[in-house]
């Protein structure tokens, strides 16, 4: 061991002691203290362990302890749950919907076909019986119902257009000039009568709608009624709910 002397001291400083140097032995691991230092010689301590933040550890420990205490603490039966208790019907419907949820694409397609078929059947029954709940959107509402009843309660020339058209077509096919002239004249008469009757029906219906529904939107109701008047009474959908001559 070679003694190592301290450098020359400045004037006025006394008591300088010569300390022999001790060679340091390292373990060759980067980031560790030399062996022989600390209370545990021979076992190097990583720098990360020495300089680790204790604030994060303390916060994590406190959070874990709080969660354990909250989980072990019994709940007061009188304390509010934070949400309303669902009704039995709502809970049953929710469980039923979860249980009936299709699991595959094939089952989902089958379910959609069944629902579409059921909806069409309900709509067909509504058109036959006049049930407002399942009628198509164009037939729903009190205004459309009043327009249907107004047309169904009276005779309309337009509803006889189809049988008269068949008769006129047969007359026009006969190779007799007089009958063909009569058929042509009948075409003109029928068209004029249908136009005049439609105008009268539209004016009267518009007046009645303004009296019955002054503040409601009546757009399209007159055209809806005129299109219904062109159909024969037996073929109208929804089915007529009033008799002829009955005031709607």
Image (cartoon, rainbow, N blue to C red):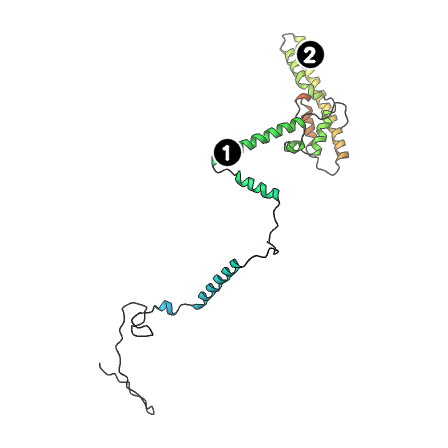
On-image quarter of the C terminus: top right
In this rendered view, identify the residue nearer to me: 70 or 54.
Answer: 70
Residue at image location 35% in from the left, 69% down from the top: 47
Q: Quadrant of residue 225?
A: top right
Decide: few, some or many residues near mark 1? Use Cα within 10 Å; few <14, some 14-19, many ≥20.
Answer: few
- Are dots 1 and 2 in contact, CB under 8 Å? no
Above-or-below relation of 95 to 228: below
Read off the residue under disc 1: 109
Residue 152 percent coordinates (x, y): 72, 25
> In 3D space, how far apart are the residues under numbered discs 1 and 2 (Cα atoms)?
59 Å
Read off the residue under disc 2: 182
Residue 220 percent coordinates (x, y): 68, 32
The mark total stands at 2
SS for callout 2: helix
SS for callout 1: helix
Q: Is residue 204 visible?
A: yes
Decide: few, some or many residues near mark 2? Use Cα within 10 Å; few <14, some 14-19, many ≥20.
Answer: few
Give the number of the mark in front: 1 or 2: 1
Q: Is residue 232 visible?
A: no
Q: Quadrant of residue 194?
A: top right
Residue 98 percent coordinates (x, y): 53, 41
In this rendered view, identify the residue nearer to me: 229 or 108.
Answer: 108
Above-or-below relation of 35 to 173: below
Which disc is residue 13 wearing?
Answer: none
Side (left or right) of 45 relative to 181: left
Residue at image location 61% in from the left, 43% down from the top: 88
Q: Quadrant of residue 43?
A: bottom left
Residue at image location 46% in from the left, 64% down from the top: 61
In this rendered view, identify the residue nearer to me: 244 or 161.
Answer: 244
């Amino acid at each position: 061991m070679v003694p190592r002397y301290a450098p020359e001291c400045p004037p006025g400083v006394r008591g300088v002691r010569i300390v022999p140097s001790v060679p340091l032995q390292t373990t060759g691991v980067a980031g560790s203290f030399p062996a022989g230092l600390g209370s545990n010689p021979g076992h190097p301590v990583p720098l990360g362990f020495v300089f680790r933040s204790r604030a994060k550890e303390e916060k994590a420990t406190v959070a874990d302890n709080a969660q354990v205490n909250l989980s072990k603490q019994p709940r007061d039966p009188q304390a509010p749950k934070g949400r309303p208790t669902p009704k039995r019907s709502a809970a049953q419907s929710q469980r039923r919907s979860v249980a009936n949820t299709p699991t595959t694409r094939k089952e989902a397609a089958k379910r959609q076909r069944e629902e579409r078929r059921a909806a069409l059947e309900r709509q067909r029954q509504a058109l036959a019986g006049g049930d407002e709940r399942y009628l198509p959107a164009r037939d729903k509402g009190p205004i459309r119902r009043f327009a249907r009843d107004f047309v169904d309660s009276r005779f309309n020339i337009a509803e006889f257009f189809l049988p008269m058209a068949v008769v006129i077509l047969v007359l026009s096919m006969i190779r007799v000039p007089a009958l063909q002239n009569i058929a042509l004249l009948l075409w003109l008469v029928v068209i004029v009568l249908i136009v005049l009757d439609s105008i009268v029906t539209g004016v009267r219906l518009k007046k009645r709608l303004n009296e019955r529904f002054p503040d409601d939107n009546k757009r399209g109701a007159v055209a809806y009624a005129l299109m219904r008047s062109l159909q024969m009474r037996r073929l109208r959908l929804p089915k007529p709910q009033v008799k002829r001559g009955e005031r709607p």
